[in-house]
Image (spheres, rainbow, N blue to C red):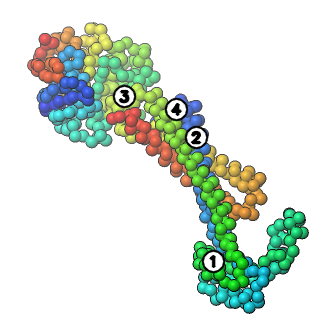
Amino acid sequence: MRFRYVLSEVLVGLWRNVTMTVAMIITMAVSLTMLGASFVLYRQVDQMKTWYYDRIEVSIFLSKDITDAQRQNIDASLTGDELVRSVEYENKEQAYTKFRELYADAPDLLSAVKPDQLPESFRVKLKDPQQYQLVFDKYKNTEGIDDIVDQRKLLNKIFDILGAIQTMALVAASIMAVAALMLVGNTIQVAAYSKRREVAVMKLVGASNWFIQSPFVLEAVVAGVVGAVLAFVGLVLSKWLLIDGSLQTLNQLLTPVHWSTIFATLPLMAAAGALISAVTAWVTLRFYIRV
Amino acid sequence: MIQLEHVTKTYPKASRPSLDDVSVGIEKGEFVFFIGPSGSGKSTFVKLLLHEVTPTRGKVIVNQRDVTSMRSWKIPSFRRSIGCVFQDFRLLPNRTAYENVAFALEVIGKSKAVARRVVPEVLELVGLGGKEHRYPNELSGGEQQRVAVARAFVNRPLILLADEPTGNLDPDTSIEIMRLLDRINRTGTTVVMVTHDSNIVNQMRRRVVEIDSGRIVRDQPRGVYG
């Protein structure tokens, strides 16, 4: 009986004020989409870091006038270095082959470059990619070494960009969340006002606060959860249409977004939506329905 | 049943207290009129009993419970022991007489089956048998007040608090409502009625407590309006 009473109160309440309810759900959905997207990005950057850090190398480019003795000397000290996991030597021909693969769509550039213009190098994988600086300091003054380049530096630029996008999404999510909060508060106020007679009588005859407030709080929670479901649908669509669709070429650079990551956003967004709505509604009621 | 001990209530920003060091005791089963001009502190008295306001100083004890220090979550269950009737009836306009009374039961967690058994009984008691399914706007003022009394009484409260229940009614209807309250009093319910209706007070000849400017100026058994 109580459950049915509360349920019908919730549905009637949401319908009575339908434009406000729709506004509340839309803002909530947009805010939660941003939250979900930033969560996906966060997971993605994490995943990319482990994927790339496993593969990145420190390139030690050798000077053009390096002697065989110097080369052997460097090779020996790298191989014996405890920071180093593996060392691979790349001669001019190999560098040229890689270069051609990399710039296959720029024939002008290819024709301008000859194999002996490209430097030989050692491709070094570190046991811990974070310790680049130690390696750099150790070898920067060694005879025969022209330049030492850490691929991680290039990657960090990409991660910085992704991080910035994530921050932007979070900022947008918080701004929209403030709007959503205000709409929830306002909707609850309107609902409480339209039922002020019932509320007055309920207080008079000694209905518990829980009983008086739960229909209003549940109204907000229902709207929050509906918003979360809409946000989830939005994320599924963008995975389907954007990431697997028009942006697929980016997949060579970015690691693929798994469906499991997308699905993991649903409980997150539903919980955030429901919690935010419930707390806002409850706080609003503290002010509007005093004992 | 009701005990006020040196109660003073001063509202914020008010220059003088609404109730000033008031002490009064009401026994179980009594019928007491509180009279006095507007602004004398009668309404504050009602609000204190319902814990709508808390006293600035002093103690309010209702049904052996110290209302002053009551935790807020206990107030709802405390209010169930007090039935309330007001000048403006406070009925829900979109509910029938039956539904108005049943609502009071439902919201404190009683089942529909209990309501089906108890509500017709109490509507019969207040003399509204056969009018259960009328809406408030299809009932006269006196009948609406009977619905309000039925709603206040349906939980069998220990105390019935009536705040100017005849304020909106003509003399004949007022007397009918008074007969109803008298009948409820005879079931053992303590009745506290705030009024400035001199006719009624003079006819009933019950205990009269007169308040003026926040102080009790008269307390006599079987009194008149003065």
Above or below, A47 relative to A83: above
* Residue, far bottom: A69
Kindly identify which numbered label has been placed on residue A201: 3
**Residue A130 in view here:** yes
Would you name the residue on which mark 4 appears? A12
Residue A115, quarter of picture: bottom right
Residue B129 percent across, percent down from the top left: 36, 19
Kindly identify which numbered label has been placed on residue A275: none
Kindly identify which numbered label has been placed on residue A27: 2
Is tag 1's residue or tag 4's residue first in the polypeptide sequence? 4
Would you name the residue on which mark 1 appears? A136
Residue B52, quarter of picture: top left
Circle 1 marks a residue in which chain? A
Q: CA distance from mark 1 to mark 3?
A: 78 Å
Q: CA distance from mark 3 to mark 2?
A: 34 Å
Q: Label 4 amino acid?
A: Val
Element assignment for label 3 = helix
Residue nearest the viewer, comparing A222 with B129: A222
A268 left or right, relative to A121: left
Task: Rate crowding at label 1 as few (under 14), some (14 to 19) or many (20 or more) other CA atoms within 10 Å.
Answer: some
Task: Rate crowding at label 2 as few (under 14), some (14 to 19) or many (20 or more) other CA atoms within 10 Å.
Answer: many
The reply to whether callout 4 and callout 2 are in contact (CB within 8 Å) is: no
Q: Label 3 amino acid?
A: Val
Task: Rate crowding at label 4 as few (under 14), some (14 to 19) or many (20 or more) other CA atoms within 10 Å.
Answer: some
> Which quarter of the figure is the C terminus of chain A placed in?
top left
